[in-house]
Each structure stands twice: as C-alpha cells, then as structure tokens.
Image: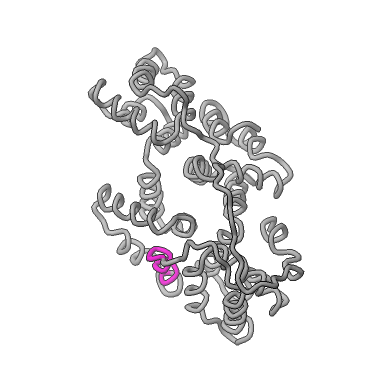
Amino acid sequence: MAFFKKFFDGIKDRKSEDSTVTVKEKPKYYGTVVPYPNFNASHDASVLKSAIEAKGVDEDVIIAVLVRRNNEQRQKIKAVYEATAGEHLDKALKSALVRDLEDVSMALLMTPAQFDAYCIRKATKRFGTDEDVLVEILATRTREQIHEITRVFKQEYDEDLEEVLKSEARGDFERALLAMFRTSRSTGTEVDTKLAQKDAQILFEAGENQKGINVDTFIEILTTRSVVQLTHTFHMYASVSDLSLPKALQAKLRGDIEDCLVDIVKVCWNTPAFFAEKLHKAMKGHGTCDDSLIRVLVSRSEVDLKKIVEEYRAMYKRSVQQDIVEDTKGHYQKVLLGLCGPN
C-alpha cells in the first residue's frame, strides 16, 4: 500500500483555479543505459565471439558489452556478428549461458517491440494468463508502440495480437484490455479543468454514488484522456468523494477488472512509482519473480529507470540495488545492478 499512501493521501487539499493549464516538461533523459561512446560494432562483435568461445565462457566480458551499449547499438552488434561469425548472436549466447543470465541476455538483444511481444506471448501461453503483464504493457505504451508490437507479434508468432487478447479475457476485463490495445489516448499537455471536474463527477456517479458500477464509463475515461488530464481528474475526484479513486474502485470491484483499472490509475498518476512497486513485489517475501525483474529493468532502462530507482528509495526507504543484492547472485546479479546504474 506504499503507493496509495505516498500518492493519494492529502490530494483533497490541491485545487486549481484556471480552466486551462499548460503543462510544460523539459526534455530530459531518465534512462540508466546510454549510448556507448566511440562505439564500434565490429570490435564488440569480435569481443563477444572471443568471450563465448573462451574456455568456460567469459561472462564478465559479455555482461560488460551488453549492459554498456544501448539497444540500437546492440542491434548493430547482432547484425555484424551474424555477418562475420555466420550465426545469430542470440543463439550463440543461448548455448553459452544458463538460467537467469541467459534470460536477461536474450531480453537485452531484442528490440523493445520484440521484447514486449515476447512478454505478451509468454503471458498468454503459460497455464493461466498473466493478466498483470498484459495490463502493464498495454497501459504504459504509446499508440505507436502498440502498433509496432502488433506488427512484430504477427511477424514472430504468426498470430493477430488483438485476437489473442480477445481469447485471453472475458467481460469487463476484455473490454478494458481492448480499449487499451486500441488506445486513442490523447498525448497532449493541456489540462482542461472544467473537463476534469465533469469527469470526476461522472466517475463518482458511475461508481460510488450508485448500487453497482458502470465499468464502461470508467474504461472510456481512463483509456482516452491524456495522462496529465487524468491526473487533474484524480485531484478533482477528491473534492466530490471521501475516497481516492483507486480506493473507490477497490470498494466496488473484484478480480481482474479491479486490478486493471487501479493499475491504469497508478500508471497515469505516477508511472515510475508504478514500476517501483512492481520491482518491490518481485523481490519481497520468499522467492524472486525473475520474469518481473527482467521485464521492468530491461524495458525501462532507456525510458525512466533512473526515476523508478529514485521512487523505489522514496517508497521503501532502501535502494532497489540493496534488494537485488539480497535476492540474486552471480553474473545475473551483475547484469541487473548494471542496468540500475550507480547506487
């Protein structure tokens, strides 16, 4: 509940006076992985080939190359490796590495769209669908990114992603998934306060203020308004209700649709905090969810992992690096720490 405590306590006190607000954000890079200076794909391909063929395999060299190059550079290394070595780099590494180190290395070698498509495929092919993974990816990718994931999914697995999603969910949850998949969410930075007030009242009437809940109303508003617009709506909701919106949803809903809509609210409120919570859940208690660790650290390493690491410390009063050290070991641990950046 650290997420709700940090981000939803006290929002009733925040009000807006203007009917329209323009939110300006300075373009700043929050990834932890940056392009390697003086990059030479041929040299890196040769180094990796030697490390793979070394007696016992030189995992340290492999890790150093993979973690210190960004995704675009890794794709160039893959192309050169195939041209010079006569085999695919991912296949060569797959035969040289084992277990979790192999998994994270394969993830790093995929393009972002390939990795997302792979994660969706894995989430829908196991015994029982991993709904959280589907919501996480669809709720945090742009329209353009989802289009590219769909293209890659068809190319890699010869299946239509929309049809796969339809087959994996039913009822309200299916409608929510498809709404995110077909996203028409605005990407604008203008906030219309009057619309935020109207939406807050509509959400209150559709949920708390009636016996049941009109899920379609929540789906429509939560999947079409811009992130900054929704953030304003969440503030406004506090002026018409004694509950924060997520707590209101939890009081009215159960199961997949509850988790889905609450996660959409979390993503729109504070995306890095949403992923910090994901990392914490992956490592708390007995056992580690390595799939979640790899998915979040790899997919956000060139997006906002720096912010996620900061939010993690603020929410849990310890660093994500500390928890990785306690939960993992060996070369796998080194890769994850390398992705997180300096402690």
Location of residue 5 in the rendering, given as x and y in whole percent from the top left corner: 72, 60
Compared to 169, does 158 lie above or below? above
Residue occupying the far bottom of the picture = 210
**Magenta-colored stretch includes residue 302:** no
For residue 111, side relative to residue 217 (left or right): left
For residue 21, side relative to residue 257 (left or right): right
Location of residue 221 in the rendering, given as x and y in whole percent from the top left corner: 51, 73
Residue at the image position 36 percent from the left and 27 percent from the top: 93
Location of residue 211 in the rendering, given as x and y in whole percent from the top left corner: 60, 87
Residue at the image position 39 percent from the left and 63 percent from the top: 181
| Main SS, magenta residues | helix
Compared to 313, does 244 lie above or below? below
Q: Nearer the viewer, residue 289 or 2?
A: 2
Compared to 119, does 97 lie above or below? above
Q: Quadrant of the N terminus?
A: bottom right
Residue at the image position 47 percent from the left and 44 percent from the top: 299
Bounds of the magenta span?
A: 174-183
Location of residue 163 in the rendering, given as x and y in whole percent from the top left corner: 30, 64
Q: Quadrant of residue 283?
A: top right
Residue occupying the far top of the picture = 55
Residue at the image position 63 percent from the left and 69 percent from the top: 234
Label tally: 0
Q: Quadrant of the C terminus?
A: top right
Compared to 209, does 118 lie above or below? above
Q: Nearer the viewer, residue 108 or 250?
A: 108
Q: How is the image coloured?
A: one colour
